[in-house]
Image (cartoon, grey):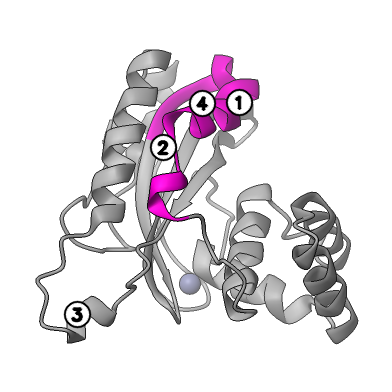
Amino acid sequence: MLQMMLDLPYKFRCAVCGGRWSSTHPDQGPCRRCTIERVKQTLTQDDWKRVDTLLRRDDRLGCFDVIEQAAPDDFALGIAQQIVDERRRDLGLRLRPAIAEVTLDAVRQAAGPHAERVVAIEALWDGDTHGWFVVLLAITRIDDGDTPFGEVHLATLADEDGDARLFAGKAPSWPEAAKATEIGDDLAKELGVPFFFASPDSPDDEAERWWDTA
Ligand SMILES: [Zn+2]
């Protein structure tokens, strides 16, 4: 059954930016980044004010509610989490937890409610105007018509130096990728599923996804 699902074509071009987009859903037009930008544009100034107020209280769930009300059609938890993380950084609040604060215990808790449906743990690169970061996801089986898999956001790992290290003449060592690999692999072993990271050695947001690799 799994093999049958994996034979489906998963590679598409993003309808907005034209970038390669691995999707579980053939009708899904925009890539992850373009979906995030579209949701951000949907939020009104009042919405952003509410998000900012909630963020300062560290009320992430409240933020997700605001985003879901503003963009119900595009809403997905992973998308909302990323928007909130980026906004936090724009506000100069501690943007993302320091790499050291992302622990196996924390990602285990995030994956916990979905553990029975997890088929893989995946790390992938994403980027915004502040630079590259690694997102750690649990891939879940959802068997919902055309859409066999879903994503659960477990953690976002960003190095505090951002891309400044590229200009500082330091050879980038990508500690966020190393940490994501270590924790992702440990969690995958606990759950008895594969760990997948297509490009652990250098940032690439068009790298193949786990569901491309059957
Ligand atoms: Zn796109």
Magenta residue check for 12: no
> Does the beta carbon at disc 4 come under 8 Å from ligand 1?
no
Report if residue 29 is visible in the image. yes
Q: Which numbered circle lies on residue 108?
A: 4
Which residue is the site of mark 3?
Answer: 166
Which residue is the site of mark 1?
Answer: 143
| Image quarter (top left, top right, bottom left or bottom right) of the N terminus | top left
> Does the beta carbon at disc 1 come under 8 Å from ligand 1?
no
Closer to the eye: label 2 or 4: 4
Residues at circles 4 and 1 in contact by the CB criterion of under 8 Å: no
Q: Residue at x 58, y 27 (%)?
A: 109
Residue interval drawn in magenta: 98-121
Q: Residue at x 65, y 22 (%)?
A: 113
Residue closer to the observer: 36 or 156: 156
Closer to the eye: label 1 or 2: 1
Disc 1 versus disc 3: distance between alpha carbons?
Answer: 42 Å
Report whether 191 appears left or right of 197: right
Q: Amino acid at mark 4?
A: Arg
Which residue is the site of mark 2?
Answer: 8
Image spot of residue 29 (x, y percent): 56, 64
